[in-house]
Each structure stands twice: as structure tokens, then as C-alpha cells.
Image (cartoon, rainbow, N blue to C red):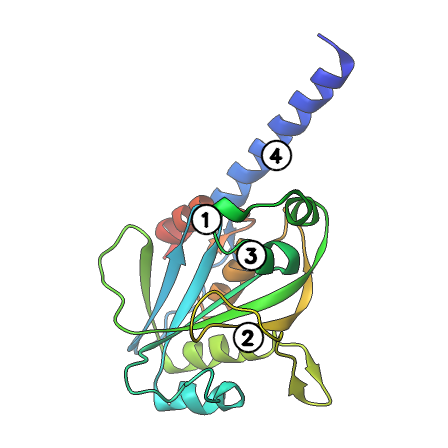
Amino acid sequence: MRTGTRWLLRVLFLLLVMAAGGTFIPRPLIAPVKASSAAHRVLLLSGPIHTDIAIPLYEETRAAFSFLDDPDFPLSHPNAEWLVVGWGGRAFYLETPTWAEVKPLPVLRALTIDRSVLHLDLAGHIAEPHPAVTAFDIGDHELTRLRRFIADSFVRNAGEIAPIPDAGYGEVDRFFEAKGYFNALFGCNTWTAAALRSAGLRTGFWNPLPQSLRLSVSVYN
């Protein structure tokens, strides 16, 4: 077997070991104290390679994200029940609205390093149970911390968020400049995992894929 092939196999084996360990080693190692009243539902929305978080659009949520409310993103619309949030690499996120539009350069940026963006959307009723939906019940303090985690992920210039002009997949979704850098090892799903941990939930130690994240949160919560 050629040296290059052996090294490739070793790297693949190491990644598999890391992914398994990242799924089944909990983070945090010690389970946090359960909320005394878990009255608020949050959702993990999973796709083939990406995850989003949906938080309920209570009045407190609308107040916490009032900086988003404008005619193009009607946060106060009476039919809006959920605020859906995802984080990801700028090139792939903006230039790949569907799988049919995959291009080499965004894929290359995703596999190396890229600037990050936040994608926000508004949703009405989200059906449960559903294979792509994992639900959790959390307390007041945990929901407040989750909202703060999301709000702190926006890039701000002199206190103002930075929307990306003419970027979106549908009628009301929006993209914003986000903190941090994206790469394949620490990407959208590791950000989602960190957001869930901010809400008092446990995840695997390293969850680069939706499948490993869903598995770990089902095991430890």
C-alpha cells in the first residue's frame, strides 16, 4: 500500500475515533442542575449536514431581539411562533440555497476556513413529532441564557448589527455578519451544540455532524 494511501486511511480512522468520542463523551462532564420549572420548549431542527435552533417567540423573545424587527423581518407578526437561528460559513451559506447550486469555491472555503454568518428565519407552527425535530423543555433562566448566547453571536459595529444586503432564501429570512470563523471541524453544528449547552443541556464533546449531535443530546438529556 502506498504511503499516501496509508496516511489517508490513518487520518480517516482518527476522524472516526474523534467523532465517536465526541459523541459519547458528554459536555459538560458533570450534568448541570435541572431547572426547577421547565416550562419553555426549544427545538433542534436537523438537516443532512446542518442544524438550526428554534426558540419560541414570546413577548420576552421579541423584546430581546427587537433590533431585528423591521418590515422585511416582521418579528412581531401575529402568525410568527418561532425564531429559527443557524450559524455557518459565509460562502457556502450564502451561495448554496439548494443542493443543485453547490459550487467548488464555497465547498473549498467550508473545508478550510471562512468568515461566519447568522441566518434567521420566522416560522409558524412546527409539527411534532417529526424526524427532523428534537424538542427540549427548559426553564426561565436557561431560555434567557440561550437568547443571550444568540444575541451575542452577532457582529456589532458601534452597537449596530450588520445585515448582509440582498441575502436570503425566502421572503422574510435574513443573513447577518456573525462572530467567529467557520471550518469543517468546528462549524455550524458545533455552534448549535454550544448554544444548547448555554441553555443547560448536555451535548457530546465534539459534534461536527447533525447525526452525532442528535444522538448525543438524546443520550444525555
Tag 2: amino acid: Phe
Q: CA distance from mark 2 to mark 1?
A: 20 Å
Work out how far the residue at label 2 is from the one at label 4, CA to CA, in angstroms: 29 Å
Q: Which residue is mark 1?
A: 210
C-alpha separation, residue under disc 3 versus residue under disc 1: 9 Å
Q: Amino acid at mark 1?
A: Pro
The disc label shown at residue 149, or none = 2
Nearest the eye: 217 or 170: 170
- At numbered mark 1, what does the secondary structure look like: helix, strand or loop? helix
What number is the disc on residue 73? none
Residue tagged by mark 3? 188
Dot 1: few (<14), some (14–19), or many (≥20) neighbours within 10 Å?
many
Reply above or below: 24 against 203: above
Residue positioned most to the top: 1
Q: Position of residue 176 (x, y in %)?
A: 60, 74
Instruction: Give the residue at the far right of this rendering.
Output: 3
> Label 1 near label 4: C-beta < 8 Å?
no
